[in-house]
Amino acid sequence: MKIQDLFSETYSNLFGNKVRSGLTMLGIVIGISSVIALVGVGQGSTQRIMSNITSLGSNLITISPGASRNAGPVSGGAGSATTLTAQDAEALKNQMTYAAAIAIELTRRYQVTYSGNNTNTQVVGTEPSYADIRNVVVDSGSFITDQQVQSYSKVAVIGTTVRDDLFGSGTDPIGQTIKINKIQFKVIGLTKAKGGSGFNNPDDTIYVPVNAAQRYLAGRTSISGIDIQAINEESISAAQQEATNILLERHNISDASSADFRVQNQADIVSSLTSTTNTLTLLLGAIAGISLLVGGIGIMNMMLTTVTERTKEIGLRKAIGAKSRDISQQFLVEATMMTLIGGVIGVLLGWGVATILTKTGVVTSIVTWSSVVLAFGVAALVGIIFGFYPARRAARLRPIDALKYE
Amino acid sequence: MKPIIFCKDISKTFVTGDIKTTVLRDVNFKIFPGEFVAITGPSGSGKSTLMHILGVLDSPTTGKYELDSQDVSKLSDNELAEIRSKQIGFVFQSFNLLPRATVIHNVELPLVYANVAHKDRQPIVYQALKNVGIEDTSHYQKRSNQLSGGQIQRVAIARALVNNPTILLADEPTGNLDQKTGQVVLDTFRRLNRSGRTIILITHDQYVAKHASRIIKIMDGKIIEDAPNDNHHFMASERKQQS
């Protein structure tokens, strides 16, 4: 049997039963398109998180207090301790050689109000160098100055989300007075939007001088973290080591494993988040893969029905000279053709769904060539695997049994 | 002359569970090229099973069947398919055309499986259709279920002949046709036989059998009579033509 004949037979068989072929293909279409759209969602969120993190500062090392550990086995949990002080930061500033900039951070959530408008947001008490380390760009007004830190000034630089919540979008909040935890702060600056979301949204943040935060808001001298910017990417691990050594010495701890603080660099955070989002991508892909499998079983089911339905025809074809190979080829090509057509439609549909998802802003879904190739390859494989069994069954029918079949 | 079909002690037993049914017992006969043989018998006599064996669709339980001096029991499935493709043409009682395919495509099908090149097919198909008396080319693009019974069976005969087989096997070819269209089909067979084709006709109908030049009668799986048919239906008309 020639290729040309094989395809014309396939064409007439698939189009001879449009509704059934269409419904069978629908399974594959849904499978493929969901693989593409969902894997795209996974990859889109990975990319978004990555860009969010890098927007939070480059070559960044953060030091946070460790778990408070009194005598006994009870751990207070990470960050609960008040083991870091402004003096630690001062020591780092004086002794570190690999640090380009260092800033103290005292971060807490507070209720913030402005003439009846009310929001709960993150308040970061910090120093001027924070702006450089964390890539905070001031859109109008100015950032905190050293002088304001020294003089315990009650001034605030607010993010765009905070501005929108308190003043309404597009308004100019500079010079207004807001109340953070019932204490009045004067707005001196508005940061440029970064477009983050969720926790640690840099746009939903208020920056105040660290001394003011300690005295008026937290009421304590401990700090919640120290941010260090390494000189360059290569010196990140050296700077990390240096900071660890200085703090261990200051805290009189000889064993690094029992340190009462934690030093993390951005790459660690990125890799831990990447592994999370990879799991997400895998999970979404697996769910979509299951629907693809179900679609494949649908194809097998239809092909088996077709074999039964066309048993007499198979017998006839064998009686007029068809070899077993001719019969199995015909069924295999039919199944494969169906998955391929379904695959093409599925890829287009998945692409469309991904675009719509991204456009509407619900989630970012990025279609990559690799996911298209993967989905298509799986579809072809599904067609061949699930077409194989019915095809073999058809080919193995004895001509006389097939011909007598009613 | 060598026989084209040689059956030696052919028996066929079907086994369904514990029940054995012997359909053919020690059947012996030879058929020579150019013969027009009718195999007759009541239903259940085993004539259809015999035809399936002759057409290598089925194999005998015991005994030897030689087709064109070749023992078919030793052949593989692919070689049997080859024989069905090149040496045997089947005509069935229920026509067995592909209902959704056109007349042309139905007749073309054996050529497809015989790997005849695309461009060579059309003249062969047209010739085969003309040979069975379907001259009107307007029918050729019709689907087979749009034709009359007699036309359908003649299309089926054209399909059986398209590969120029040595033997034409017909199983009750007139069984689903009225007398008039049945006669047209029988005339077609007669004409094909006169041009040298070997034809084996299976029928329970004595009238149909009388068109053949030799009649083999089977009863309960055994040949009870094998004789030439000297005064078959065509004798009169053919004599008239000759004189």
Image (cartoon, coloured by chain):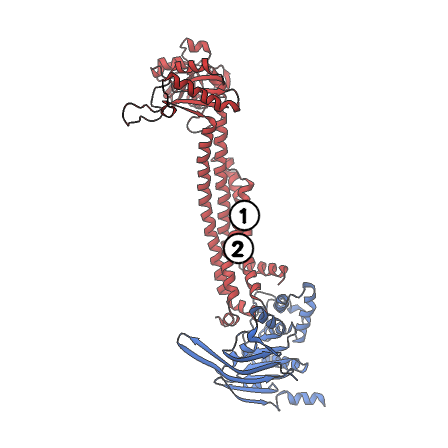
Chain colours: A red, B blue
Residue B173 visible: no
Q: Which residue is mark 1?
A: A376
Q: Which residue is mark 2?
A: A384
Examine the rendered structure and indicate whether residue A137 appears above or below residue A344.
Answer: above
Residue B221 on image: x %, y %? 49, 84
Tag 2 and tag 1 share a subunit: yes
B209 or B77, which is in the foreground? B77
Q: Residue at x 59, y 73 (%)?
A: B152
Q: Residue at x 48, y 61 (%)?
A: A304
Q: Secondary structure at mark 1?
A: helix
Examine the rendered structure and indicate whether residue A270 appears above or below residue A377.
Answer: above
Question: Sequence order check: which comes first, mark 2 or mark 1?
Answer: 1
Q: Is residue B240 left or right of residue A164?
A: right
Indicate the chain on which mark 2 is placed: A
Residue A40 on image: x %, y %? 50, 39
Amino acid under disc 1: Phe
Amino acid under disc 2: Ile
Q: Secondary structure at mark 2?
A: helix
Residue A111 on image: x %, y %? 36, 21
Mark 1 Cα shell of 10 Å, populated few (<14), some (14-19), many (≥20): many
Residue A207 on image: x %, y %? 43, 18
Estimate the spatial distance between the alpha carbons at disc 2 and disc 1, rounded to whole Å.
12 Å
Q: Is residue A51 left or right of residue A6?
A: left
Residue A402 visible: yes
Q: Quadrant of residue B234?
A: bottom right
Q: Residue at x 60, y 81 (%)?
A: B5
Quadrant (top left, top right, bottom left, bottom right) of the N terminus of chain B:
bottom right
Q: Which mark is residue B10?
A: none
